[in-house]
Amino acid sequence: MITALVIGGSSGIGLATAARLHAAGDTVHIAGRDAARLQAAVDEQPGLVPHRLDAADAPALVSLLNELETVDRLVVTLSGNTGAGTFVDLDIDVLRTAFEEKFWPTVTAVKSAVKHLSGHGSITLVGAVTARTGMPGTAGIGSLNAAVEGLVAPLAAELALIRVNAVSPGYVDTPWWNMLPDADRRALFDSVAAGLPTRRIATADDVAQAIVLLATNPSMTGTIVEVDGGAHLTA
Ligand SMILES: NC(=O)c1ccc[n+]([C@@H]2O[C@H](COP(=O)([O-])OP(=O)(O)OC[C@H]3O[C@@H](n4cnc5c(N)ncnc54)[C@H](OP(=O)(O)O)[C@@H]3O)[C@@H](O)[C@H]2O)c1
């Protein structure tokens, strides 16, 4: 029996990944902070095992991982929504918050999980296209995602035989964008899609497909897969 833990699995890319892993036969645990979101995820994808957890809370992670004992696939898809904006206008405390919301919980989750990962287990993280392109207005959020992606190569070498990889998405239609009113989000997506080689905004499932590949392919480690519609070519 294969056990997967998707931290951030109650929404968007994490939920789509959890659904794919469950369909493939894994026992899939999902973790997130909001109980209603977790319940909605389980209503949508029966069979997922929900856990209310803030990944910034190391003792809570230890307790969950002790309960699970062994994890074969750790997937960390959590994030906040802050850190974007032109560099001169970006409040440094807002950028600190962005790191508190994504980088440190990701590090905490990986550190807590390492000793629970099975010998041939995998860790899959999520960066973003902003880590590797020169888009104006992304120095903050880009450096945050570069920090996440920067974990991949050294951890893949250090934690072997455990494999460590990441995906680097571009624009993905998930609840992450709910801070924008519907009409504004649609207008943004239409205009971005028109400039992408793929002419489309990715779905959560597009990204989940790549995460499942990284989480399951025994020969992939130290790899960051771009799932950005070619945004890295056009930025
Ligand atoms: N959507 C995009 O366009 C896009 C583009 C590039 C990269 N990404 C990256 O893709 C990843 C997934 O994003 P998404 O679009 O799927 O976002 P999403 O739909 O907002 O989902 C984020 C998930 O993370 C959980 N979460 C956040 N903070 C957490 C914490 N401290 N502990 C536990 N769970 C936490 C959320 O649940 P709770 O809030 O209930 O905890 C939710 O389940 C993120 O790393 C994001 O930066 C997204």
Image: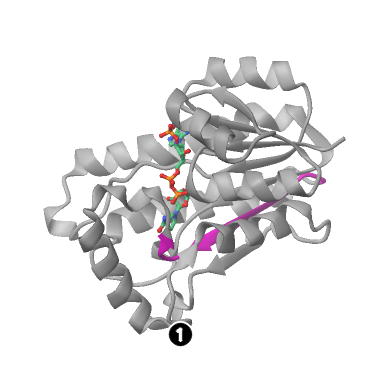
Closer to the camera in the image, 53 or 97: 53
Say if 95 sits above or below 47 in the image: below
Secondary structure state at the residue bearing disc 1: loop
Image position, residue 66 (x, y; %): 71, 16
Say if 233 sits above or below 164 in the image: below
Q: Quadrant of the C terminus?
A: bottom left
Say if 88 sits above or below 124 in the image: below
Image position, residue 155 (x, y; %): 66, 47
Closer to the camera in the image, 206 or 99: 206
Q: Is mark 1 within 8 Å of ligand 1?
A: no
Image position, residue 21 (x, y; %): 72, 47
Residue pictured at 72% horizontal, 59% vertical: 213
| Magenta stretch bounds | 161-172
Residue, disc 1: 197
Is residue 165 visible to us here?
yes
Say if 62 sits above or below 3 in the image: above
Could you tell whether 157 is left or right of 143 in the image?
A: right
Q: In which quarter of the image is ligand 1?
A: top left
Residue found at the far left of this picture: 89
Question: Secondary structure of the magenta portion, mostly?
Answer: strand
Residue 222 figure quarter: bottom right
